[in-house]
Amino acid sequence: MLKLFKIAVRNLSRYKRRTLLTSSLIAIGVMFVLVFVAASGSFKYIMIGQITDSMLGHLQVHKRGYVASIDSLPLTLNLSEKAEKKLEETMEKIIDIESFSPRIKFGGMFSNFIETTNIRVNGVYPEKEIATVPLFLSRIKQGKKSIKEGEILIPELLANGLKVKVGDTVVVIATNRDGSVNGKKFVVGGIIESVTGPGGRDGYMHIKDAMEVLRMEEMEISEVAIRLKDFSKLNAVSNRLDEMMSKELNKQGKPIFDVRTWEKLSPFYNVARMIDVMTFFIKLMLIAIVLVSIMNVMIMAVFERIREIGTISAIGTKPKKILSLFLIEGFSLGVFGAAIGNILALGIVFLINLVKITFNFGRQSGLVLSPSLSAGDILWISAIVILVSVVAAFQPAFKASRMEPVDALRHV
């Protein structure tokens, strides 16, 4: 086999220009695919990070049925204090959970005593919320980077529309689960921007203030946002938590808790899926380039070396060895092209990180693209290229191995 490799490499070196051109096409294809995978992967994870670390969290737990009615923020589908404590006890047993933040969500009316509009309010524990969604504070454009009792963070849309500034006194009015209406005065502690655009209407207040507005005698939780220590364990932790909480049943014998990953809660998951689809089609283009390049070279190699094939066949070389010889040539072209492409891709990724390309996403600006290539990406793409190179060389190699020596020696 070693001798066949030496002969194959020598044959490729005899046609330097053609070999170099083919290897260059393969290398360029590999380079562009790897750079695209690195850049798109970086953008994808930055996008996911902005969504999960700004508002959603990695996981969320609700009372079963709440998500289906989430647009109306139903108070009748909140988790009871007993259920919430049971959930906390279970989460504390899972070492992969870094932090969690209970929230009370409700819809209400917001007034500056002159005009009134609707608002979605999130009652949170400030310390737990910041630990679970660490980019939350970066969304506060004006005012203090905190949530204090008696203060409210209002969305930018409301601040501009009602001309409300930090320090102004406003009132929030809400209807509790029993149908009674209650209002409470707040001081505007800050103005917060939406993650998804200027149309957001989510405001934030301390969870004790939310309980007071809703006249809650006992704690009731709309949702619990969860942050993981390792995002790559998202599905594993979600499945484990769901399995542990599925044992908690209501009076009808159905599970109380509904565990969902960010993917099932945010429409931006579809954007992430589109990036994966684009990456897949880019890989298909690479396969097509390699297939056509290798097949063209090997067909030409067989055509130009027909008499040579006839000679080595006439002196007793078996068809299997002739087949192997041409397959090794295709394999060698694939290996060489993939190796050069990997080196070029690593160089370009290094330069991109050195230059620090910035872009805006949603309401966030100055995000830095930080592409990286894992050993898995490099090995997977290289394996595809080499496999396709061998497959492309098979038909010409098979044709060469089946030539009759007499006919081959007659060829001019």
Image (cartoon, helix red, strand yellow):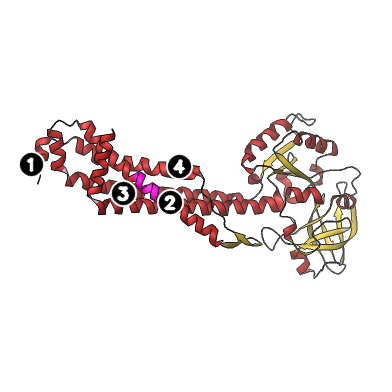
| In the foreground, 201 or 403 | 403
| Mark 2 to mark 1 CA distance (whole Å) | 45 Å
Tell me, for residue 410, which label it has, or none: 1
Instruction: Confirm or deny contact between disc 3 and disc 2 (CB under 8 A).
Output: no
On the image, the x and y values in percent for residue 315 come to 13, 32
| Mark 3 to mark 2 CA distance (whole Å) | 23 Å
The image shows residue 358, relative to residue 206, as above or below, that is below
Name the residue at 26% across, 54% down: 17
Secondary structure type for disc 2: helix
Find residue 370 and report its image quarter: bottom right
User: Which of the two discs, 4 and 2, sits closer to the camera?
Assistant: 2
On the image, the x and y values in percent for residue 269 come to 60, 49
Label whose residue precedes the other's in the sequence (3 or 1): 3
Find residue 384 and report its image quarter: top left
The answer to whether residue 309 is magenta is no
**Which residue was labeled with disc 3?**
292
Label whose residue precedes the other's in the sequence (3 or 2): 3
Q: Amino acid at mark 1?
A: Arg
Tell me, for residue 380, which label it has, or none: 4
Instruction: Confirm or deny contact between disc 4 and disc 2 (CB under 8 A).
Output: no
Q: What stretch of residues is rendered in magenta?
A: 334-344
The answer to whether residue 335 is magenta is yes
On the image, the x and y values in percent for residue 190 come to 80, 63
Name the residue at 78% across, 36% down: 87
Left or right: residue 155 compared with residue 272: right
Q: Amino acid at mark 2?
A: Ile
| Mark 3 to mark 4 CA distance (whole Å) | 20 Å
User: Which of the two discs, 3 and 4, sits closer to the camera?
Assistant: 4
Q: Amino acid at mark 4?
A: Trp
